[in-house]
Amino acid sequence: MLHFPAYKVLMAALSITMLVALNSVRAQLMISSPNGEMSIKFGVLSQFQGETFTPSGKGTSMDLYIRRFRILIGGNVTKELSFFAETDNPNLGKVGYSSSSTKGASDTYIQDAFMTYTFTKEFMIDAGMLLMPVSHNSEQSAASLLGIDYGPYTFLWSGPTGSRVGRDYGIEARGFLGEDHFEYRAGLFQGYRGAYSLKPERITLRGVWYPFQNEPGYFYAGTYLGTRKVIGIGVSFDHQVDYTAYGADIFCDYPLSNRDVPTVQVDFTHYDGGTFLPLIAKQSVLFVEAEYYFHEVSIAPFVQANYVTMGTSVPGNVDLANRHFLQGGIAYYGKGHNFNVKLGYGSYGGDGLTSQTQVLLRLQAFVF
């Protein structure tokens, strides 16, 4: 049960951010050349968040802050050559559960930056700063997530490999084969470079089979809210020296005859950092989330479950213990992914770890 101060935080967040979002959602801004071949468009992703966090037996921290604020830019140079980039300033204003009273004020930085040359739909080349295809969840756009956020263990490889929030620098080939029912992605990335940048490059591979419609863009979605009928069965592989990650996932986003949409995603990934990346201990990560979207009222209850199973568990060690995060909540899609409100309650725990609870209220305004 929420304490009264936490209740006031959440109600204040909802009232303020609904006003902000309703005034923020507009049609996209795009400039095109007379022949329509060259274009550039601009957008914004804004996520305002209210949060309470309670370690077992301790006080409850409360924050009102900006979870993400991104400026997006994309377009076409020619019919074949497109580009995309965005900035981010995450957790702006957050204090969190710590002895410091300093509000988060991180610098704005580049979050994504890449260009794509499309030879045909069967063969495209992406080059730049790219999300890594280690699982379905790791390739999703933050603007179209099903739950309130990514799984907390989705990018656990990011720091040790020298990646930036799940992105790495490199080049990737991708395309759709078999009448668009099969997708492949094969990339060569920097990975962990080491002193003097002498280490071999990082290799990624991903394949997905779609019996119905595919996921057409570079970024996957957590749910298409009835606009596509998608079942995707995927496998992924990530390797550098003796670090290896491999996994399988299934994503089902299937509109019913009444236009309601049940969505289920299950990702399993096994990691072994070897001697090359010892900070990535041998472990397996299971990510599960599900939602049922009631089309008539634009409301969707959702659940998310995350489990880390270590090769050798060390109880009490936050990095080496078996651990989990469970979350349930409800979303209101007032304007799909352009404007929505999500409320969730989550619980962290694990072998010998202090149990923690979290309440999140997220409001999103997105234009692109």
Image (tube, rainbow, N blue to C red):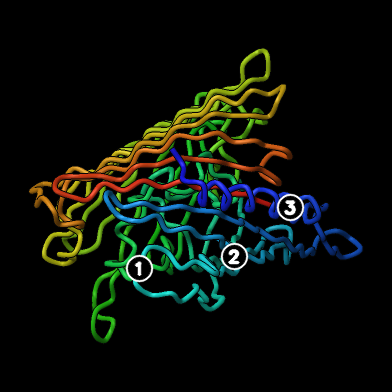
| Nearest-to-viewer mark from 2 and 1 | 1
Question: As shown in the figure, which amino acid type bears the numbered disc 3?
Answer: Ala
Tell me the quadrant of the picture where the C terminus can be found: bottom right
Residue at label 2?
115
Spatial CA span between label 2 and label 1: 40 Å
Spatial CA span between label 3 and label 2: 30 Å
Q: Residue furthest top?
A: 257
| Nearest-to-viewer mark from 3 and 1 | 1
| Rendered view: 132 above or below 311 | below
Measuring from the top left, give residue 351's x and y in whole percent.
Answer: 15, 45
Q: Residue 161: which quarter of the image?
A: bottom left
Which mark, residue 21? 3
Measuring from the top left, give residue 193's x and y in whole percent.
Answer: 28, 76
Q: Earlier in the sequence, mark 3 or mark 1?
A: 3
Residue at image location 54% in from the left, 52% down from the top:
142
Measuring from the top left, give residue 365's x and y in whole percent.
Answer: 69, 52
Residue at label 1?
98
